[in-house]
Image (tube, rainbow, N blue to C red):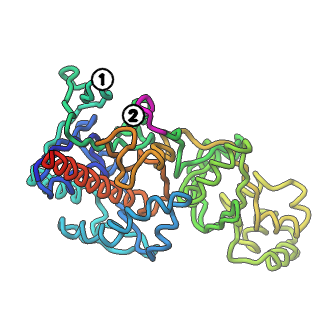
Amino acid sequence: MNGNVIIIGGGPAGLMAAEVLAQAGVRVEVYDAMPSVGRKFLMAGKSGLNLTHAEAFATFVSRYGEKRDWVKPWLAAFGPETLRNWARDLGVDTFVGSSGRVFPTDMKAAPLLRAWLHRLRTTGVHFHMRHRWLGWDEQGDLHFATPTGAIKVGAGGTATILALGGGSWARLGSDGAWLPLLQARGVAVAPLRPANCGFEIAWSEHFRAKFAGQPVKSVVATFGGERRQGDFVITRHGVEGSLIYALAAPLRDAIASHGSATLQLDLAPGKTLERLISEIAHPRGARSMASHLQSRAGISGVKAGLLRECAARDDYHDPALLAAAIKALPLRLDAPRPLDEAISSAGGVMAASFDDRLMLRALPGVFCAGEMLDWEAPTGGYLFTACFASGYAAGHGALAWLQSKRSSNTAN
């Protein structure tokens, strides 16, 4: 069909919207502030591109928490299996790992992105790099800063899709600078907050110096009725890693409400409390407490350090109290780490700002997609899947809007 769409932002959401529109015969112009597109996508794939997850659809949707009902229609149209088929069409096969996570067979993001960009260019998508969006003027034209000076691009009669990312990893392009631009136009926006982030803990200098950088493996973390098993890492500032990220949203919100949050750690999930009490109460003779805990309870290294750091000193004189500390060690978190360090961000353009096509009610013809929308999800492929799916939804929304305008103009 005839028409023209301007897409600002060259991450997965913007590129997916571009593909939907270009395949429908729409002329697509993609603008991005960075020297090349997909930079955060490539960075996220450096340790193995976790594209999506192979669990049951209902479980998959539940990972989006209180925003699940908003996200669900996007995923129904372009969900995990559709994403895997899409990658296969680009010549990239995927496999399901032992945890259910889905990866390209070569684990890399770059081959997929190269194949995708080649297909987009062959369908007529035009790319304009190093174009930083500055907002609209009174006539509705789009303003950009470029290496050769400021320019404006006429947006009258066209659709615009904003896919500018959230507020994490600003050096890769998603710096949240779009928030005031939309707020000034009457769009409801929730403040950006860190998601899938680390947290600060006031470690003693001894513990920090000895254990920063070390992984804590095979523990169970409990907070707010949620219980997760996995690994995390001690940092100079506190803790980070997949187990922490899985509980990051409720931890962050509790800190915002109460000033701190206490996470409970089970350092010996394979042993019952009763067994631990019995093992610790076993006479240790001339052995040190450290040797005793290592041989009888399997607590050594960084786990022993955590126990010393967080348990009460008197607990070491009572096997029942010490066993209880091992099974439910209180870890007080004081603050999330800064937004720019987070894997992703929460907040953004609120659901009430959109119609069911992801078009802004306050700005007809302007659509949004990706992480700049007010949803969040844990790591495990959920972030990428929803970004692709929202881009797919926004692309179809813009296509429907162009068709309705064309029908209206024909009728007149």
> Does 103 appear in magenta?
no
Q: Which of the numbered marks, if any, corresponds to residue 138?
A: 1
- Asked if marks 2 and 1 touch (Cβ < 8 Å), the reply is no
Q: In which quadrant will I find the N terminus?
A: bottom left
Residue where numbered disc 2 is placed: 178
Mark 1 crowdedness (10 Å alpha carbons): few <14, some 14-19, many ≥20:
few
Q: Which residue shows up at 29% across the image and 31% down it?
A: 133
Q: Compare residues 114 and 327 and report the one nearer the observer.
A: 114
Q: Residues within 10 Å of mark 2 (few under 14, many from 20)?
A: some
The span picked out in magenta is 183-188
Q: Amino acid at mark 1?
A: Glu
- Whole-percent x, y for residue 182 in the image: 41, 34
Please state if 27 lies on the left or on the right of 211 as rendered.
Answer: left
The image quarter containing residue 57 is: bottom left
Image: 218 above or below 121: below
**Residue 46 in view in this figure:** no
Task: Give the distance between the C-alpha atoms of the residues marked 2 and 1, in whole angstroms.
Answer: 17 Å
Q: Residue at x 34, y 54 (%)?
A: 357
Closer to the chain start, of discs 2 and 1, is 1
Name above or below for residue 163 compared with residue 262.
above
Q: Nearer the viewer, residue 294 or 365?
A: 365
Q: Amino acid at mark 2?
A: Trp
- The x and y percentages for residue 314 are 90, 56
Image position of 159 with respect to 62: above or below: above
Q: Please name which of the two marks, 2 or 1, marks the residue nearer to the observer.
A: 1
